[in-house]
Amino acid sequence: MAKQLEASVLSMFSLISTRHATKTEQDLATSNTGVGPMALPQPRAGLMDIPFYEGGKSSLKGHGRVIKLSSNESALGPSPAALIAYAGVASNLVRYPDGNAAALKDAISDVHGLDPDQLICGAGSDEILCLVCRAYAGSGDEVVHTAHGFLMYGIYARSVGATPVAVAENNLTADVDAILAAVTDATKIVFVANPNNPTGTVLSGAELVRLRESLREDIVLVVDSAYAEFMGGSCYDGGQALVESTPNTVMTRTFSKIYGLASLRVGWAFAPRSIIETLERLRSPFNVNGAALAAASAAMRDVAHTRSAFDHNLRWMGAALQRFRSLDLDVVGEAGNFVLPKFPNVPGKTAADADAFLQSKGIIVRRVANYGLPDHLRITLGEDDEMEAVLTAVTKFMGGDDG
Ligand SMILES: Cc1ncc(COP(=O)(O)O)c(C=O)c1O
């Protein structure tokens, strides 16, 4: 019996391999029904036009330890409480995480005074930006964003078959009138990052309100506040009041920046209940993993650590702006945890030259040519010694006194 089975398996195998062996490439391109080319799986129209998102480099050939200032990660890292919470999850990896992220929503609600039923958590705020596109845009629709806005807006728009529309900025700052002029009957979503990455510029609360009031009601306005926690002052609320007072605005936030949890991929959004209920239907059931939920809840509650990270950032933002400007490097935006100096378009002094010089010193910053900013470098504000190193290196590069 076993012998018979073996023989029949062997003969089946030889039949299959003979079939494969006798097929030429020509055959493979032709249907075995004889009615036309074989239908290999094809991605939806337009998907292959989506550019790859390139993250910041993290290593350099020939350099063991590098100074990585290329991805706007936190200088101080996560709260010690977040690390303890993260480690605590190791003993319970067998269980699915809470798909509703209740403890994390409670932590966000306690710290920000928001209704937990108006929150959604995601695998990074990236996931939520994607969910908004999947929910509200599709083939034939348009998704508006600013010309130097976060690259993922265009990528997610294309992923659902919509057309991204990049709107010119005014001095690297979102221009409300230009955004409104770009809106058509096909517009479904407007994305504004506030502060914006990589420009570090901010739209005032009044301008955001004007934008919302002038947009059609059926257009979702997404205020991407990934860098909100680096903003000081009582006038800025990340878009919270606008969400509370309108039925069509979404504010997205992340644990990847000030909370130092980029690797865990956690983000959240505050939105009207009807939008939350829509997005909740689309997300995967356990989109935020257990370690991420535990660490993010603890990080949110460690307000003192967040404050230290804010103070550290403020100090180095001031020092970096002062240094770059004293070197005659133009810097427009002053918000976020990064600076965007513009280098001269002079051989030997360009952004590309500066990048190469910094790399030779083991320092990785971000070229932003793919954001339409070939003359700029985006430099994340890092730890004290990293900041001293990068400011000294840029000063040397520009031929100044490195003191
Ligand atoms: C403006 C902006 N929005 C959203 C994100 C995505 O953040 P995450 O998916 O890590 O939460 C980033 C990350 O760099 C960003 O700069």
Image: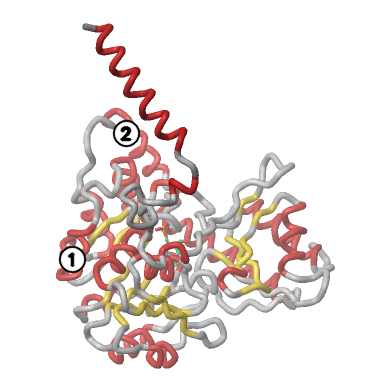
- Please report the residue visible at 27 percent of the width from the left and 49 percent of the height from the top: 287
Residue wearing tag 1: 278
Q: Residues within 10 Å of mark 1 (few under 14, many from 20)?
A: some
Looking at the image, which residue is at 32% across and 78% down?
Answer: 140
Residue 211: x %, y % from top left: 34, 87
Q: CA distance from mark 1 to mark 2?
A: 33 Å
Q: Nearer the viewer, residue 1 or 64?
A: 1
Tell me which label, 1 or 2, sits earlier in the chain.
2
Q: Is residue 141 left or right of residue 70?
A: left
Q: Position of residue 198 (x, y in %)?
A: 54, 70
Tell me the amino acid under the disc marked 2.
Answer: Gly
Towards the viewer: 25 or 150: 25
Q: Residue at x 36, y 57 (%)?
A: 36
For mark 2, give the secondary structure. helix
Ligand 1: image quarter: bottom left
Q: Quadrant of the N terminus?
A: top left
The outermost residue toward the front is 34
Write the residue at 77% across / 58% down. 357
Disc 1 or disc 2, which is closer to the eye?
1
Q: Is residue 234 visible?
A: no
Ligand 1 under 8 Å from disc 2 Cβ = no
Kind of residue sitting beneath label 1 = Thr
Left or right, 401 with respect to 372, comes to: right
Q: How many marks?
A: 2
Quadrant containing the C terminus in the rendered view? bottom right
Which mark, by number, is residue 88?
2
Where is residue 395 drawn, in percent x and y?
A: 77, 65
